[in-house]
Amino acid sequence: MIEKIRNRIIEPSCTLLNALKVMDEQKVKILFVFEKEKFIGMLTIGDIQRAIIKGSALTSCVENIIDNDKVFGHVTDSSQKIKDEMYRLRAECMPILNESGDIVDMLFWTDVFLNTEHPPRELIDLPVVIMAGGKGTRMRPLTNVIPKPLLPIGEKTIIERIMDQFEGIGCHKFYLSVNYKYEIIKFYLGSLSHNYDITFFQERKPMGTIGSVSLLNGKITTPFFVSNCDTLIDQDFRDVYDYHVKNNNDITIITTVKSLRIPYGVIETGDNGLLKAISEKPENAYMINTGVYIMQPDLINRIPENEHLDITDLIKDVMNSDGKVGCFPVSERSWTDIGDWDQYLKRIRP
């Protein structure tokens, strides 16, 4: 049984940052915490996200955030009871414990159900604004010919993959802010067999990362998503919306944990150049803005008409007026910045 999950086992002393790294490496969203041979509990990506939102440091240990109320199966449970619980919880897996609390079996969704699809979850139908007007200068010379939203990833373009993800959670109304080579974007999307519900709006001059949204004043009356046209995130955006609503945020930023290791010994000196400390190849973690947001509709009124405005300026304005700006974290490898050559090549190479 342990062989099923060996690569997903961590110790209670594992930090949140290292747990995220294991999830990324194994491409999973659940880990199993053991102290030597003793099963302690399960750790999900949701546990880590909630802990970070509540202020836990990335260097804190996972033993501090383990949810002791998680539902597990027991050897005395019938197969039907375990199946019903997995379906109710939409559980990817269910540990089966004996009377001593030891794992005797591990059932995964595909072990119990004939199909790999999880049970249906309530859909949300919110407008989605996609900022697709940039020149894609980081991707030149390719974007000298093809606008960045139409760069291919497999059999689809970036913008199709973004819209497909939103349609998967129930969002169908898209607003595309366009400028550079917009005729090509409009022609391509209009020629697809799949009919996306798109309203194009054109900025006549560069208006920053949020300025063109002023053109939607009066058209959007509900909370709405805003996404860059080069950002792919492996996250169910309904979780982000739930957090946005529960926290009563004006803006919610989807962030990612980015760790950077300095490949040298870092020196700290004091008076007269005397050495105070030396750290060999230290690693620091930062929260990075992914370029995907949820915003309340009244914020459109704060965007000046026909003026340049970046999203960071709007965020500062909201904070200065005592508004609430929330941050919803995802793991480092859950976010891909397709506007970067290295990341783009990783996605298109087999």
Image (cartoon, rainbow, N blue to C red):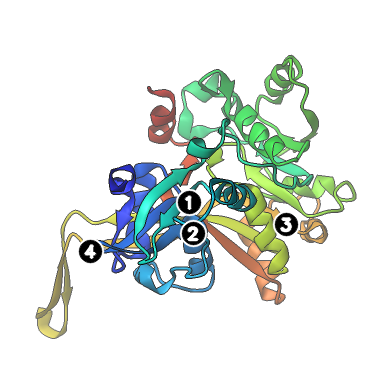
Residue positioned 77% across, 27% down in the render: 196
Q: Mark 3 and mark 4 in contact (Cβ < 8 Å)? A: no
Three-letter amino acid code of the residue under disc 3:
Met
Most extreme residue toward the bottom is 271
Three-letter amino acid code of the residue under disc 2:
Phe
Q: Disc 3 to disc 2, how far (Cα)?
A: 37 Å
Whether 134 is drawn above or below 72: the answer is above
Q: Nearer the viewer, residue 118 or 259?
A: 118
Mark sitting on residue 72: 2
Residue positioned 41% across, 48% down in the render: 106
| 3 or 2: mark nearer the eye | 2
Q: Disc 4 to disc 3, how far (Cα)?
A: 46 Å
Whether 286 is drawn above or below 338: the answer is below
Q: Is residue 136 left or right of residue 282?
A: right
Q: Disc 2 to disc 1, how far (Cα)?
A: 6 Å
Q: Position of residue 17 (x, y in %)?
A: 36, 60
